[in-house]
Image: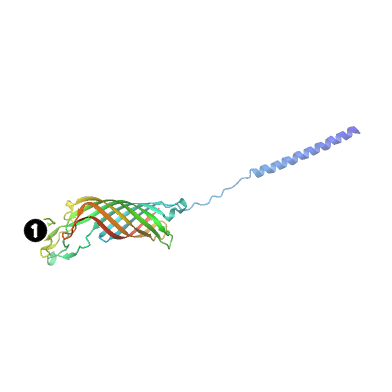
Amino acid sequence: MKQTFCILFVFVAGLQLAGNAYAQTAASGKDTVKKYRPTYVVQKPSGPKPISRELSVGLRLNSNGWSGFLDIGRVKSKDPKHSDMFYKVRLWQIEFTEKKDPKEVKITGQGGGKGSNKYIYGKINNMYALKLGRAWMKMLAGKPDPGSVSIHWLYGGGFSLGMLKPYYINAFSDPNAIKYDDNTKANFLDKNVIEGSAGFAKGLGEIKYVPGFHVKSGLHFDFSANRKSVIGVEVGVNGEYYTQEVQLLANRTGTPYFVDLYVALQVGKRW
């Protein structure tokens, strides 16, 4: 009897141990499945590429002439998130300009009939300049979204290469075209003996180069309809200084500097 009771006790204890082991194995399996459950990463589509460059061309009307120019820019921003708001733009500028004296007056010579020609009275030199400069634009207000305008402050300066070309006229007193000097001064200012201008090509081989520098400052208004275009209007003031006096009219004293107001229109693209 005692022996039978011992056998039963051992049998029940074995069943209990086996049940506990099975429960632990099942629980361990559940934890393992949960731990290694695969995860999936959803990638958000990337936005448009940030703007970093711009290129534009334009025409500038100055109070003492005109200019054609090319701007090559690099866009800077406060942070990559705002790269298309054009907070700052660094520019290389190439410009070709013609300087005129505000007192210039074009009149008709005394050639008469078919030979009559217009000329600028008293003009002795044409003045042109090739300018290479560095400029910066800093946004003051707005951003170039459709229907809005961005306003930038622009400032900069650089090197100027002045080019002086003698201005030739035809006069009754001389069979050849003449330019201004001490010997021709009297005829150059006598309207009664001047037939007219000798033409632009006359004097191209006598250009004198005068180095100098320039500075500028103004407001730039961007009316672009989208982020990849440039449609701008700029107003400002420009100053130039050269290493020698430049005289454009015989009856006006020469000067080494020019100061003018300007308004410019430009178009281009960004990428």
Front position in the image: 169 or 11: 169
- Which residue extends farthest bottom? 113
Q: Amino acid under label 1?
A: Pro
Q: Is residue 26 shown above or below 89?
A: above
Q: Residue 140 occupies which quadrant of the picture?
A: bottom left
Q: Residue at x 66, y 43 (%)?
A: 33
Tell me if 179 is positioned left or right of 146 in this view: left
- Which residue extends farthest right? 1
Tell me if 85 is positioned left or right of 157 in this view: right
Q: Residue at x 24, y 55 (%)?
A: 257
Location of mark 1 (residue): 175
Image coordinates for residue 72, horizontal then vertical, percent: 34, 52
Question: What's the colour scheme?
Answer: rainbow
Q: Residue 142 occupies which quadrant of the picture?
A: bottom left
The quarter of the rendered structure image containing the N terminus is top right
Tell me if 150 is positioned left or right of 249 in this view: right
Image coordinates for residue 246, horizontal then vertical, percent: 20, 55
Q: How many marks?
A: 1
Tell me if 32 is positioned left or right of 216 in this view: right
Image coordinates for residue 230, horizontal then vertical, percent: 37, 57
Mark 1 nearby-residue class (10 Å; few <14, some 14–19, many ≥20)? few
Secondary-structure class at tag 1: strand
Image coordinates for residue 228, horizontal then vertical, percent: 40, 56
- Which residue extends farthest top? 3
